[in-house]
Amino acid sequence: MRVVVAGSSGLIGTSLVAHLRAAGHEVLRLVRRTPAAPDERGWDPPAGRIDDGTFDGVDAVVNLNGAGIADRPWSGARKQLLRDSRNVPTEVLAGAVADHGVGSLLNQSGINYYGDTGSRVVDETAPVGAGFLAEVCRDWEAATAPAVKAGARVVLLRSAAVLSPRGGVLGRLRPLFSLMLGGRIGTGQQAFPWISLDDQVGATQFLLEHPDVSGPVNLAGPEPATNAEFTAALAEVLRRPAPLAVPSFALKAVLGQMAEEMVLTGPLAVPAVLQRHGYQFRHVTVREALAAALER
C-alpha cells in the first residue's frame, strides 16, 4: 500500500515507518518544514495546508499527532495545547481523506477514553468515561467525522502506555528503578494499561491490512496489569529492589489533576477487537514486554 504517516518523527511513528517499509509498503511522511527527502511532504495544520499531490494514489493515512500528555504540568494553556495539537491536525487530515477519496484513516487516540474503571474490565463497546483525558479522546475521535461521512474506513487507535527501549514511560522510570528509587504508586491496585512497542506498530500494520476492521480498537496488552504488578515486573527485569511507595497525596500535591487521571486511576481495558480478528500479540504479559524492551 501507499501510506501517508503524520507524526512520523515520534517514538511510535519512527518505528511504524520502518516496520511498514520492511513489510513492503510505500510510506510518505508529512513534515512541518520544507521537505528535504523524496519521501517527505510538507503541511501546515493550523493553516489547513498540505502540499499538492500528497494524496495521489494513497490508500491510507495514519495520524499520530499530539503533544505529549505527561511532558509538562496541566496548566490552562497546556490543556488547550493538548486539545489543539490533536483536534486541528485530525480535522485537516480527515477533510483531506474525504476530499481525495482515500480509503482508510487510522487515527491515534488514547486508552484513557474510558476514564477510571476501577476493577471493571472494559472493551471497545464501553462508553466514554469522565475526566479531562476522556474528554480529549472523545473530541479527538470526533474530529474524524469528515472522513466517516465521506465513507472512508476510520479506525480509532486507543493506545495504552507504550513500553519502548527508546523513551516513553520507561525512559522516565528506568533511571529511578536503577537507583533503587522506584516503587508502587498509591495503593498500587489501580489499572496500568500497557502495550509493547512491537505490538503497537504490529497491530497498526495489522489494522492497515485488514479492511474489515473499523471503529475503536484498544491497543493494549491482552493481560491487564495493576500498578503494583507493573512495578514488581520492572524491578524484576532490572534486578533492582523497589522498596518505596509514593503516597497519593504527595503525587497530587506535585502533579495535581495529571496525577489523578494518569497514575492514580486508569481503565482496565482489553483488546477485544484485535483478539476477535486474530491478531497475535508478540508480548502477552507486562513482564514479557518489559524484558523485550529492556534487554535490547
Image (cartoon, rainbow, N blue to C red):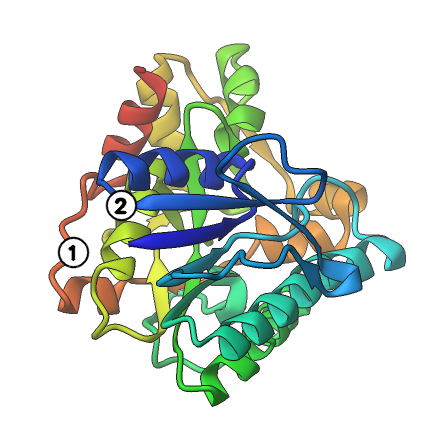
Mark number displayed over residue 75: none
Q: Secondary structure at mark 1?
A: loop
Q: Amino acid at mark 1?
A: Tyr
Q: Is residue 114 left or right of residue 288?
A: right
Q: Secondary structure at mark 2?
A: helix
Q: Spatial distance from mark 2 to mark 1, Cα to Cα?
A: 9 Å
Q: Position of residue 204 (x, y in %)?
A: 32, 53
**Residue at 64%, 37% in the rendered image:** 35
Based on the displayed image, in which of its 4 quarters is residue 216 positioned? bottom left
In the image, residue 92 sits, relative to residue 281, either above or below, namely below
Q: Are marks 2 and 1 in contact (CB under 8 Å)?
A: yes
Q: Position of residue 57 (x, y in %)?
A: 38, 61
The quadrant in which the N terminus is found is bottom left
Based on the displayed image, in which of its 4 quarters is residue 213 positioned? bottom left
Q: How many neighbours does mark 1 have within 10 angstroms: few (below 14), some (14-19), or many (20 or more)?
A: some
Mark number displayed over residue 202: 2
Q: How many neighbours does mark 2 have within 10 angstroms: few (below 14), some (14-19), or many (20 or more)?
A: many
Q: Position of residue 118 (x, y in %)?
A: 45, 66
Q: Viewer-proximal residue, 42 or 196? A: 42
**Residue at 13%, 50% in the rendered image:** 280
The quadrant in which the C terminus is found is top left
**Residue at 31%, 42% in the rendered image:** 20
Q: Earlier in the sequence, mark 2 or mark 1?
A: 2
In the image, residue 94 sits, relative to residue 5, either above or below, namely below
Residue indicated by mark 1 = 279
